[in-house]
Amino acid sequence: MERLTPSKSTKGQGSFVQNLQGATGTGLAAGTHVHKDWWAKTLSFDTVLERAEKAAQDRTDYMVERSEIQPLVADGEFKIGVRGKTFRPTDHCLQQLSTRAGVKSASILREMRADGNADQLDAETMVQIANNSLRRVKGDKVFRLRTYGDGTARAMLTDKYAPVDNRWYLETLREFLPDGRFSHDKSDEDTVFGNILLPDTILDKSADDDTDYGGMVSIGNCEIGKRRLSQYPSIFRAICMNGCIWGQQKGQKISKVHRGEINLDSLKTTIAENISLQLKLIPGGLDQFLACRSKGFTGSAKGVIAAVAQEMRLNKVEAGRTLEQFAQHETHQKNLFGVINAVTRAGQLGSAQGWVRMDEIGGSLMNLTDNRWDRIKTIAGTMTDKDFERAFVLSA
């Protein structure tokens, strides 16, 4: 994978934007290749994360067996009943229901109400079609039904589907690109889709570079099966006041299917490398994260994690979970990188507040000096069984 460099054929494209008068002023926003009008429309990571958190608080995912899913008519409409509640499926959910149930024509349920004139009889027919197909699905087969407080069911997924939380993806990007701005937003409650625009101060442009370009990362992720997790960096000459991108060169894309067990730490590394290798960044956050792999240790990971717990003031439960996560997922990473991954994995097993705290500790560990890391390894070598008893509470 090579660093993106601007093409001579695009030089000069979008140069008119520098003198383009708009509602907020003339030309580019300071330190960017984006017109002031468009930069004013971009969003901070905090704003986008707040929106994603609000959506997460408004929804409930039901992991239920097929026998608990009941197509029914309520208020003259086709709805899905689950555990005493009823939900109106969106078109996307209807399509998934048809596919999961093996309806002969997978689009028939969606099409039956597509014109908005579906009545009670249509709804009853839809119930018959759905039940006729569902009866052939094993009663103990597990599905994930995503519902919202507005009474809608947004998705019906199999238990093999592994959603990547939009908040995790956004937080990962914010960790690496803290000064980025969210642009070209086409997101909804279940999907993030847009571009992360980078101020010029983030890009490391050496003297022999063509400096007349900006950088961005295009991202996408959907928790209900509309799109894979995806990302590709790109460089561009300018973005004008209506969001048109001039002289764009797209980099190499990464794509992750939501299926099976997803190793978030490995995915985080892939995301970091994809950005870092194609867009040279000044802050060094990505390089710093990846460089933690060079801070290795020998001997038992138990002693190192006990010493880390002492240094970072983890309680016994947090330390125990960290040790367990290291043993399950990180034994091949006998270095600080593996320890950080174990810490952030452990955070996902606690409360929302605890998750944030453990992520912050992971960030602090990423900034360890060589001296502090050496001290931790020295302390690890002195740990005894009594020290371990004081450090850990392990799951039964």
Image (cartoon, helix red, strand yellow):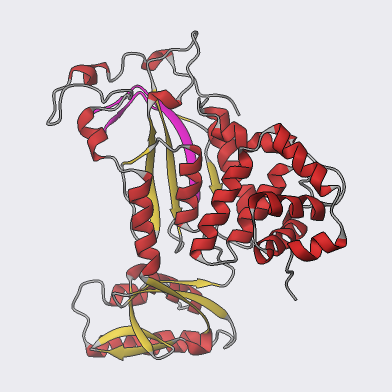
For the record, the magenta segment spans 229-249
Res 63 seen here = yes
Q: Quarter of the image for the N terminus: give it.
A: top right
Would residue 44 appear left or right of 265 to someone viewing this image?
left
Asked if residue 23 is positioned above or below residue 100 in the image, the reply reads: above
338 or 255, which is in the foreground? Answer: 338
Q: Residue at x 50, y 8 (%)?
A: 208
Q: Residue at x 57, y 66 (%)?
A: 350
Residue 247 located within the stretch drawn in magenta? yes
Would residue 175 appear left or right of 298 to someone viewing this image?
left
Res 124 seen here = no
Q: Residue at x 38, y 58 (%)?
A: 52
92 or 177, which is in the foreground? Answer: 177
Residue 323 located within the stretch drawn in magenta? no
382 or 84, which is in the foreground? Answer: 382
Asked if residue 34 is positioned above or below residue 257 in the image, the reply reads: above
Asked if residue 280 is positioned above or below residue 341 in the image, the reply reads: above
Residue 299 rendering spot, x and y as whole percentages: 87, 47
